Image (cartoon, helix red, strand yellow):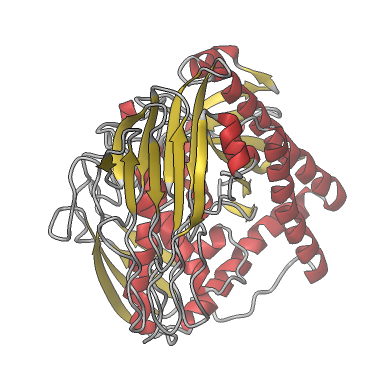
Amino acid sequence: MNDAPLELESDAVTFEVVRGGLVAICEEMRTVMTSAAFSPLLSLSSDLSCALLDQYGDVVAQGNDIPVHLGAMPFSAKGMLARFPLDEWRPGDAVLANDPYSGGSHLPDMTLMTPIFDDAGVLGFAASRVHWPDIGGASPGSSAVTDEIVKEGLRIPPVRVLRAGVMDEGVATLLFANVRVAEDRRGDFQAQIACNRRGVERVEALVARYGGPAIRRILAETQTYSERLVEAALARIADGTYAARQHLDGDGYIEDRGDGPLVLAVAVTKRGRRLEIDFAGTGPQARGPINAPISVTASACYYLALALGGGDVPPNSGAYRPVLVHAPAGSLVNCVHPAPVVSGNTEMSNRLVDLMFEALAPAMAAGGIGGSYGTAGVFALGGHDTHRDRRFVHLETIGGGMGASAAGPGLDGHRTHMGNTMNLPIEASEAAMPLLIERYELVEDSGGTGRHRGGLGVRRVLRALDDGISFSLLFERALHAAHGAAGGAPGRTARFHVERADGRIEPLSSKTEAGRLEAGDRLWLETAGGGGWGR
């Protein structure tokens, strides 16, 4: 614990100019990516994240992107550096990885890291994590119920994909032979390479202006700055240990109505300016894909620390230092090979945030925050578009209800906590696949009641225009409603079904193995509402 004020070796003006410049570079990297990407998931929904790292693989700046990506970024970077030490990097190189068991989050999140040099050698890295709409595997979109990671898609431990700016065609051939609609994936990857190059160019310009030693110093100072801000925020919370337990809906193979093995348990110990988060008592890793690698679990814990900081803490690895995470190996929150993990990123991370906020509610003067809709709301579709005579893969996320708090009602129809993707216009969806979106609206009265109402869920209805369209769903809170806070009521649960062309209704679970739509069938998706706050 350090109570002394932060003393900068850099002058304060230069520190703020460079620190702000680093954040602006991350935002510019994202603009390059969204402008050049082929897939609507990237160009319009922005399911991607950009960051700048120091030579040790720690984040020093990041864009306003996806929290679950960015909290896990240091794990991927350190995994890459373990495989490729600093003395093996050359200008124009780039390393690609998505392996959850060497620092990644889930297979669709492809992390690319490119070195930045000054006169002394590797100064740091430009990094991007991009959710590819398909990475192979059993189902289109690579986001479906499976029971082994090998069925989820192509798993890539750190591999050098660019050497001195030149693509390794052997690696590229192997990569694009194992994904659907390979021409689109190749275009997205070229956009990702350009995104990283822009980051390298902009940091090199800062080095040319201020010198390598000054930039290296500020990369360290900005992390210390964030660490001190988080410590100050934690000092305002009463010391103690706070606990909570919740259950997940299911893993695609079993459902847990509150008495099954899919239990999440946490004890959050606040002591001085440190936060210790222990998940002992959490259930063993599941057969289905709800398991979280340690990088995802830690990312949710880091998000909690930033949230307690009130939004004023520059997010980087320094902000994570006051947080210590204990997660039993082989459990739902620290799975081991060969557990499937695709929902660990999209469902588990959000449910862990709700769990920790529920635990800390007694320590928070305002009574905490209601639970959220608990998911990224992922649905994937694929097949052959007879009208355009081409194969298609389409993956989307849907918003839902955010929990209410003392500050006011929860947000309606919004991505909450660990996700930050933008709304994808229905015109873009309809242009990408043979489906008609007949309804896209908020679900009335789905937010929990209270002094402040929980956010409303979203209803989306899609009608198939072609036969043989496969679909998969990864959602949460169909069985367990989002809890209220300070006496507020829980939100309404999520609901899913297929309405066949002949009028038959087929209920679906929140984790649905690959299904099939024929022309005229309708897929109904209704996400959960958030919990209310106050009586």
Foreground residue among 225 and 68 = 68
Farthest residue toward the front?
502
Residue at 48% across, 28% down: 465
Q: Quadrant location of the C terminus?
A: bottom left
Foreground residue among 167 and 479 = 479
Q: Position of residue 68 (x, y in %)?
A: 48, 52
The quadrant in which residue 23 appears is: bottom right
Residue at 73% across, 60% down: 19
Q: Is residue 105 visible?
A: no
Q: Is residue 128 left or right of residue 350?
A: right
The quadrant in which residue 359 appears is: bottom left
Q: Where is residue 319 in the image (x, y as percent from the top left)?
A: 54, 64
Q: In this view, does 257 lie to the left or right of 191?
A: left
Residue at 54% across, 57% down: 317
Farthest residue toward the right?
209
Q: Where is residue 145 in the image (x, y as percent from the top left)?
A: 30, 36
Q: Is residue 333 visible?
A: yes
Q: In this view, does 11 lie to the left or right of 421?
A: right
Q: Where is residue 529 in the image (x, y as percent from the top left)?
A: 40, 64
